[in-house]
Image: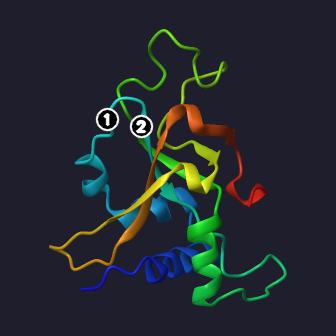
């Protein structure tokens, strides 16, 4: 088994290119059980790494490991998978005024503000799936469409 995030990100890009729901593709790539077993501390937010489709709307193939690596290292949008117990609570201002941050939201952040790590399911011999932990106060925006930001 190898922990190769580029391979997992390529699989994710291909699934999205075939029309898969990006939320479902990220969750399936990591594995629901691994996400359920993970509990972020305090004000940390667990975010699944988003990658663009490997096929543009006009049918141009973006492909290549270099493109996937760019999304991994410089991507600025991720899917909220879990929030720590202090997110949306406490004496400080809430993150968003209209509704609390919750799993399923797309968020924008500076890649360097988030700590990347990999979910690895050794029982299923799965390669590592890229995820990030970020403090809630470092999330810059909630976005409706992950393709709207890069």
Placement of 147 over or under 93, stated as above or below: below
Q: Quadrant of the N terminus?
A: bottom left
Residue 8 is situated, as x and y percent measured from the top left of the image, at 44, 77
Q: Are marks 1 and 2 in contact (CB under 8 Å)?
A: yes
Question: How many C-alpha atoms fall within 10 Å of the one at disc 2: few (<14), some, or many (≥20)?
Answer: many
- Residue identified by numbered label 2: 44
Residue 5 on image: x %, y %: 43, 76
Crowd class of label 1 (few under 14; some 14 to 19; many from 20; radius 10 Å): some
Would you say residue 19 is visible in this rendering?
no
Q: Is residue 131 above or below residue 120?
A: above
- Left or right: 132, with 110 as reference point: left
Instruction: Say what secondary structure mark 2 lies in.
Output: strand
Q: Position of residue 97 (x, y in %)?
A: 66, 18
Q: Which residue is located at x 71 percent, y 86 percent?
A: 62
- In the figure, 88 relative to 74: above or below? above
Residue at screen point 39% across, 68% down: 129
In this view, 138 is above or below 110? above
Q: Residue furthest left?
A: 123
Q: How far apart are the two marked residues, 1 and 2, measured between alpha carbons?
A: 6 Å
* Colouring: rainbow
Q: Nearer the viewer, residue 22 or 122?
A: 122
Residue under pointer 1: 41
Instruction: Name the residue rendered at 32%, 62% in the picture.
Output: 31
Residue 1 is left or right of residue 13, and the answer is left
Label 1: state its secondary structure. Answer: loop
């Amino acid at each position: 088994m190898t922990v190769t995030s580029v391979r997992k990100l390529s699989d994710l890009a291909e699934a999205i290119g075939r029309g898969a729901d990006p939320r479902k593709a990220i969750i399936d790539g990591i594995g629901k059980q691994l996400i359920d077993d993970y509990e972020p501390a305090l004000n940390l937010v667990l975010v699944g790494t988003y990658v663009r489709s490997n096929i543009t709307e006009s049918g141009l193939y973006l492909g290549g490991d270099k493109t996937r690596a760019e999304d991994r290292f410089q991507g600025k949008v991720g899917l909220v998978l879990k929030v720590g117990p202090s997110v949306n609570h406490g004496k400080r201002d809430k993150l968003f005024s209209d509704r609390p941050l919750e799993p399923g939201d797309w968020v924008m952040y500076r890649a360097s503000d988030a700590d990347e790590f990999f979910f690895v399911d050794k029982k299923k011999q799965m390669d590592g799936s890229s995820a990030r932990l970020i403090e809630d106060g470092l999330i810059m925006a909630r976005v409706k469409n992950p393709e709207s930001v890069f």
